[in-house]
Amino acid sequence: MNTIRYNDQLIPVNGTILQSLEKASIKVESHCRAGFCGACRLKAKKGKVTYVTEPLGFVDDDEVLACCSVPQGEVEITTQ
């Protein structure tokens, strides 16, 4: 089952990571919502994601762009 763990909360997946967090009333910085600007960059502590659109914004190996990614299984993320 795909889930997002964010600050000890287990969030059900409903769209991208950004959409799922917003639907759970969690405020995440965002701007372009398309993987270009990198404003929604989050730290991935555990798990892997799939990008629904290939991001143009720079991400390190331990980061994800929440606006264009979905979890593979359980993903644990935090703000930068």
Image (cartoon, rainbow, N blue to C red):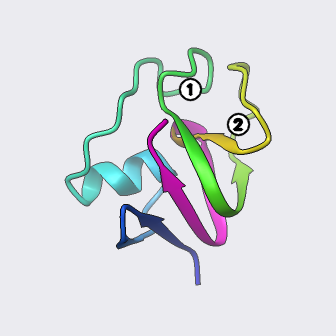
Q: Is residue 75 magenta?
A: yes
Q: Is residue 74 magenta?
A: yes
CA gap between label 1 and label 2 equals 8 Å
The residue at the point 62 percent across, 47 percent down is 69
* Main secondary structure found in the magenta portion: strand
Q: Quadrant of residue 71?
A: bottom right
The residue where tag 1 is placed is 34
Instruction: Tell me the number on the disc at residue 59.
Output: none
Mark nearer the N terminus (1 vs 2): 1
**Residue extent of the magenta highlight:** 67-80
How many numbered discs?
A: 2
Q: Nearer the viewer, residue 67 or 29?
A: 29
Instruction: Report whether 39 appears left or right of 72.
Output: left
Q: Nearer the viewer, residue 5 or 31?
A: 5
Residue 76 spot, x, y in % from top left = 55, 64
Residue 1 spot, x, y in % from top left = 58, 84
Few, some or many residues within 10 Å of mark 2 (<14, 14–19, 20+): few
The residue where tag 2 is placed is 53
* Mark 1 and mark 2 residues within 8 Å of each other at the beta carbon: yes
The residue at the point 62 percent across, 17 percent down is 36
Instruction: Report whether 56 appears left or right of 6.
Output: right
The residue at the point 57 percent across, 75 percent down is 2
Q: Secondary structure at mark 1?
A: loop
Residue 8 spot, x, y in % from top left = 36, 70
Few, some or many residues within 10 Å of mark 1 (<14, 14–19, 20+): many
Tell me which amino acid carries mark 1.
Ala
Residue 30 spot, x, y in % from top left = 40, 26
Q: Quadrant of residue 54?
A: top right
Q: Is residue 75 above or below residue 49?
A: below
Q: Secondary structure at mark 2?
A: loop
Instruction: Report whether 70 appears left or right of 7.
Output: right
Tell me which amino acid carries mark 2.
Thr
